[in-house]
Amino acid sequence: MRLSPSPPPNWVDDRTVLGRLIAAVLAVEPLRQLLFLQARRMMIRTAETRGIPWRQRREELRLQAEPLLEACTNPATQIPAYYRARFHAYQEGNLCWQAACETEQATDSVALRVWKEEKQLTPEAAQARMREAIYAAIAPSLNAPVRDVLDIGCSVGVGTLALTGWLERRGYGAVQVSGLDLSPQMLAVARVRDAGGRVHAWHHAAAEATGLAASSFDLISAQFLCHELPAAATRAVLAEALRLLRPGGVLALVDQDPDAEAIRAMPAPLATLLKSTEPYLEAYFRLDLPAALSEAGFVGLSRVASDHRHRVLVATRP
Ligand SMILES: C[S@@+](CC[C@H](N)C(=O)[O-])C[C@H]1O[C@@H](n2cnc3c(N)ncnc32)[C@H](O)[C@@H]1O
């Protein structure tokens, strides 16, 4: 197992010619806007040709989620400045209905793209396969009873519900899984998607300042959160996770794998599109997350490539 960091992929690294070229293209605002739109069109087209009813689902979710906004908003929650950046082709980033009502579809597209050569794979099957592989990577580290679980950066709850199902199937009957996110719109959609109320609580808070009680969780997951954070915020999230975990508790971080060939060798046009929608991608790839975990006080680090694009880092609070 290799725990030392890879350099960032050259397309995201402004010290390389390709990285500088891509950064220069993205610095031209009209071009950046065009790429934003292009990225969005490509995403929707791919999704709809693969059986994800992108627009229809957006309208359904919005209708049901809008009335829940107030109940999902904690007025005391401070929104950090970095969070107001443009993400994923949305001017208002994660703080808008369009983003929230398209995230389920986008998440299924991400899963389909992992196995893009399998044209018969349904979005549900791809999503289930991606999540099963993630949780299989966490399983060996769960040596103590798991009762309280927190999924930070839970978004619309795709991973929260998948993790809940996985824990239930593994016989953790009395487990209580909660989700936490900074976007009240995302949380409103999560509540709509969790119509059966399987998730214990949906918290509106920053992952670095949750306001939750110390030593109150056995497992914390951050599924695809870290690539949306500047390095200082990631370090703050790790410190908060350490505070929230009980001794022996486990933190699992899933995200893009800096060592994966599929990521490193991404064709330049695709890389440019991706970079135009992810403001902190370079920061993510530059940060040595395994080192940051040990600096935060975690031990027993393991690293597993859960598929050919994503890796799971699992670490324990001593
Ligand atoms: C890519 S999505 C996560 C996807 C989801 N966990 C899953 O497994 O499908 C990232 C989420 O992290 C949330 N987020 C970003 N920064 C955050 C922070 N500091 N605290 C809490 N949530 C944050 C965003 O609002 C967004 O919903």
Image (cartoon, grey):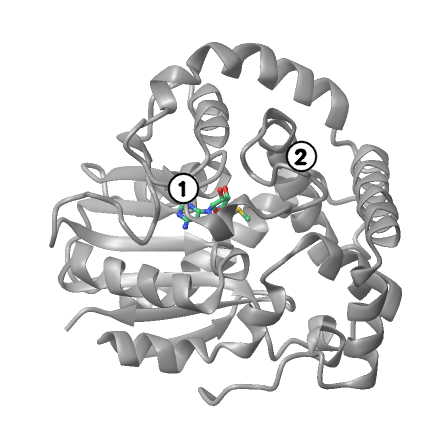
Left or right: 96, with 175 as reference point: right
Q: Quadrant of residue 114?
A: bottom right
For label 2, the SS is helix
In the depicted structure, whether residue 285 falls above or below residue 114: below
Q: Position of residue 1 (x, y in %)?
A: 45, 87
- Vertically, is 223 above or below 178? below
Circle 1 sits in a helix, a strand or a loop, which is it? loop
User: Which residue: 52% across, 14% down?
Assistant: 66
Q: Is residue 243 left or right of residue 24?
A: left
Residue closest to the eye, 132 or 226: 226
**Where's residue 161, x and y in %?**
42, 36
Mark 1 vs ligand 1: CB under 8 Å? no
- Quadrant housing the C terminus: bottom left
Q: In the picture shown, does residue 13 fall above or below 88?
A: below
Asked whether residue 108 appears in the rendered view, the answer is yes
The residue that appears at 72% across and 61% down in the rendered structure is 275
* Displayed quadrant of residue 128: top right
Question: In the figure, is residue 16 to the left or right of 316?
Answer: right
Residue 47 relative to residue 215: left or right: right
- At x 47%, y 49%, the residue is 81
Corner quadrant of residue 294: bottom left
Tell me if mark 1 has few (under 14), some (14-19) or many (20+) residues whose alpha carbon lies within 10 angstroms of its own. Answer: few
Give the residue type that dot 1 points to.
Ile
Q: Position of residue 177 (x, y in %)?
A: 28, 39
* Residue under pointer 1: 79
Looking at the picture, how far across and down is residue 24, in whole percent?
82, 69
Residue that carries the numbered disc 2 in the rendered image = 105
- The residue depicted at 50 percent of the width and 34 percent of the height is 156
